Amino acid sequence: MRRRLARDWRAPLPGVVATFTGAPTPRQRLIAAQLYAGPEAIIGSTTAAAWHGVEAARADPVRLFVPRSSSSRRAGFAVVTRTTRADPGSRWRPPLRFASPARAVIDAARDTGSEAGATAIVIEAVQRRLVTLPLLQHELERSPHRGSRPARAALVTAETNAWSVAEVDLIALVASSRYLPTPWPNADLCSFDGLRLPTPDLWFDDVGLAVQLHSRRYHARDDDWDGTVMGDSLLGEFSVPVVRLTPARVEREPDRCLARIERAHRSAARTGRPDVIATPRAA
């Protein structure tokens, strides 16, 4: 064993031997951490959330939970924590076991260390329909109250129907205006003949004004970006005025962005509301 470890094998974690040299793949890291934590361990928190598809969650370090009879410990890229809460919805993907989506998202929101990070994780999980708000609320209430403030704040924000942290910032910016009414986040739009129209990030129903946040970060694929551009064009065909902003611009120049929205709202009030039907999205 010592000779092979010196030449052909490696020990990524205590008691775990990899029969190869070089860096392990992400899946091999998960397997090594599962072997290190023991057969009753469940991969959870940010690692499980990332595995379920939440890109805002960081998969490193590999976080695992073990029953109370085991011990908490940390070595290399693996963090093992004891828990008294069972997770009947855990996913068994041999040889790996992952926490359920609700458990993973709530634990990730608690462990991410900031309210902004927790909000990004929760909003993405809900927007991608990986888990529902009621399930997250149920999981939060059965989890320890200590350290739950970021997760609780994230759930409150998710109930506004915002689809990204950038939208949350935009909603807060609009709320600071003394002139603008309360907009509808991600309202459903259609024409009077039943044609489904693109969903604006914010919708002012009194004048029929749309506000769109455009960012390459949220439209990584070319077809996503093309679809965004075509969507704005379709709104224009139905005489819907659109204010186009970027998250970076809102962050750097909030006052100028708010002034643009206020000017567009006044202009839309003078020209009349477009012939579209808008429905607020239920939380």
Image (cartoon, rainbow, N blue to C red):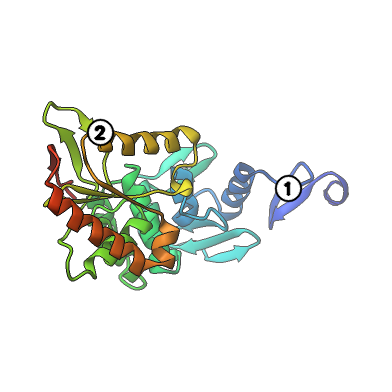
Callout 1 secondary element: loop
Q: Amino acid at mark 1?
A: Ala
Name above or below for residue 106 compared with residue 177. above
User: What residue appears at the point 47 percent right and 57 percent down from the top-left corner?
Assistant: 66
Return the residue at label 1.
23
How far across and down, in percent of the image, does residue 91 sit?
42, 41
Residue nearest the viewer, comparing 99 with 149: 149
Label 2 element class: helix
- Measuring from the top left, give residue 39's x and y in whole percent: 53, 48
Q: Using the image, determine if residue 203 lies above or below residue 67.
A: above
Query: Label 1 crowding class (10 Å Cα cut-off): few <14, some 14-19, many 20+?
Result: few
Where in the figure is residue 207, as x and y percent of width and height? 14, 50
- Image depth: mark 1 or mark 2 in front: 2
In the figure, 237 relative to 105: above or below? above
| Mark earlier in primary sequence (1, 2) | 1
Q: Name the residue at 77% across, 42% down.
A: 20
Where's residue 244, x and y in %? Answer: 35, 50
Q: Amino acid at mark 2?
A: Glu
Image quadrant in which you'd find residue 37: bottom right
Marker disc for residue 237: 2
